[in-house]
Image (cartoon, rainbow, N blue to C red):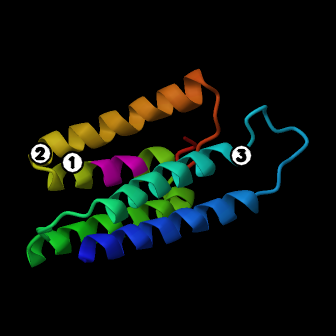
């Protein structure tokens, strides 16, 4: 029963994504795909995945222990803080901290986590900003 509830919640969330995507106003300078495409793709994947969970639930779902649920909650809080800190610290710094924390919680040592965080942040910055020319949130250091 809990799987079906989870699936229905996912379908409701997918419908919310669709409505949010349809509310995006397009500029006359938008590209051929437009700004609505990505949220619509996410909504489609989420909706289909949720429908599969509703139609074929697990007979005996195993929910994680309380400690694991706390870790998942902490990861969600880190992602919310990441979104809030993008405008304050900038993309490179905020991404480095978020990626380092998540790598640490996934089992990396603290030193490895810092390397993963910095490498991920700089790598994404180079690809998206320097190579593709996309705008990323600038921090106090100008990048």
Q: Which of 33 and 139 is in front in this view?
A: 33
21 inside magenta stretch: no
Mark 1 and 2 residues: CB-CB less than 8 Å, in contact?
yes
- Lower position in the chain sequence, tag 2 or tag 3: 3
Callout 1: SS: helix
Callout 3: SS: loop
Q: Residues within 10 Å of mark 3 (few under 14, many from 20)?
A: some
Residue that numbered label 3 is attached to: 35
Choose mark 2 or mark 3, whichever is in front: 3
- Lower position in the chain sequence, tag 3 or tag 1: 3
Residue that numbered label 2 is attached to: 108
Q: Position of residue 26 (x, y in %)?
A: 83, 49
- Lower position in the chain sequence, tag 1 or tag 2: 1
Q: Position of residue 121 (x, y in %)?
A: 39, 39
Residue that numbered label 1 is attached to: 103
Residue at 33%, 53% (x, y): give it: 97
Toward which corner of the image does residue 129 lie, by quadrant? top right
Camera sees residue 76: yes
Callout 2: SS: loop
Left or right for 33, reference 121: right
Q: Position of residue 34 (x, y in %)?
A: 75, 41
Left or right for 27, reference 82: right
Q: Nearer the viewer, residue 10 or 120?
A: 10
Residue at 25%, 77% (x, y): give it: 1
Query: Residues under labels 3 and 1: Cα distance?
Result: 30 Å
Q: In which quarter of the image is the C terminus?
A: top right
Highlighted range, magenta = 95-99
């Amino acid at each position: 029963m809990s799987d079906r509830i989870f699936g229905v919640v996912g379908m409701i969330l997918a419908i919310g994504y669709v409505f949010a995507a349809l509310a995006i106003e397009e500029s006359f300078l938008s590209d051929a795909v437009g700004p609505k495409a990505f949220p619509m793709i996410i909504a489609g994947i989420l909706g289909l995945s949720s429908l599969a969970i509703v139609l074929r639930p697990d007979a005996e779902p195993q929910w994680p222990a309380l400690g694991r649920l706390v870790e998942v909650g902490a990861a969600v809080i880190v992602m919310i803080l990441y979104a809030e800190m993008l405008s304050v610290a900038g993309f490179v710094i905020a991404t480095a901290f978020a990626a380092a924390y998540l790598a640490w919680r996934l089992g990396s040592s603290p030193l490895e986590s810092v390397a993963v965080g910095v490498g991920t942040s700089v790598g994404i910055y180079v690809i998206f900003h320097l190579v593709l020319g996309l705008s990323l949130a600038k921090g106090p250091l100008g990048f």
